[in-house]
Amino acid sequence: MTDPQKPDPQEPLTPIVLPAGSGPGGRPQNTQPSRFGDAAGSIVLLVLSFSAYLIGVILSFFGFLVSGVCAARSCNADAGSAAQAIVAVTLAAVLLLGAGISIFLIVKKRRAIVVALVTLVLIVVGWIVGVVAFFLALAS
């Protein structure tokens, strides 16, 4: 009588096939597969961030034109122009940093939509702060 636990040496061995992702070369356990919606949503939000930045730069250019014709005694055109320039440069850095981090996270298959959303919110809030700073600087 043969033991069912021991294979018969005369029978050919059958290979054991592991399910995908369960072997040592599989997906790491601490990562989740990236969903298409995350990458697409991140790209849409980054395009909206860039559009908001461009709209702000165009409106800022009109602010430069307005501050150039104001009377020297009634407004401070230099401070208004400086406020707009500082906001534009700061928001450009925020946009580049947010886009770079989002792209890095998309490539690493991590959740990037949160970073893209924060970038968009910072751009919009930054331009609102920039408009307030522009008018406060003109009045000083």
Image (cartoon, rainbow, N blue to C red):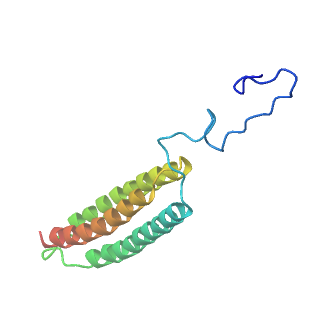
Q: Quadrant of the C terminus?
A: bottom left
Image: 21 above or below 81: above
Q: Is residue 117 left or right of residue 1?
A: left
Q: Is residue 28 left or right of residue 81?
A: right
Which corner quadrant of the image does residue 77 belong to?
A: bottom left
Q: Is residue 47 left or right of residue 129?
A: right
Image: 88 above or below 10: below
Image: 23 above or below 60: above
From the top left corner, tell me how far across and down residue 112 is, in percent: 45, 55
Observer-nearest of 1 and 92: 1
| Residue furthest out toward the front | 1
Q: Is residue 101 left or right of residue 122?
A: right
Q: Residue at x 32, y 69 (%)?
A: 124
Which corner quadrant of the image does residue 81 belong to?
A: bottom left
Total numbered labels placed on residues in the image:
0
Observer-nearest of 94 and 87: 94
From the top left corner, tell me how far across and down residue 85 is, in percent: 32, 62
Q: Residue at x 20, y 71 (%)?
A: 132
Q: Quadrant of the N terminus?
A: top right
From the top left corner, tell me how far across and down residue 71 is, in percent: 19, 78
Q: Residue at x 28, y 75 (%)?
A: 68
From the top left corner, tell me how far across and down residue 63 is, in percent: 31, 75
Q: Residue at x 61, y 32 (%)?
A: 24
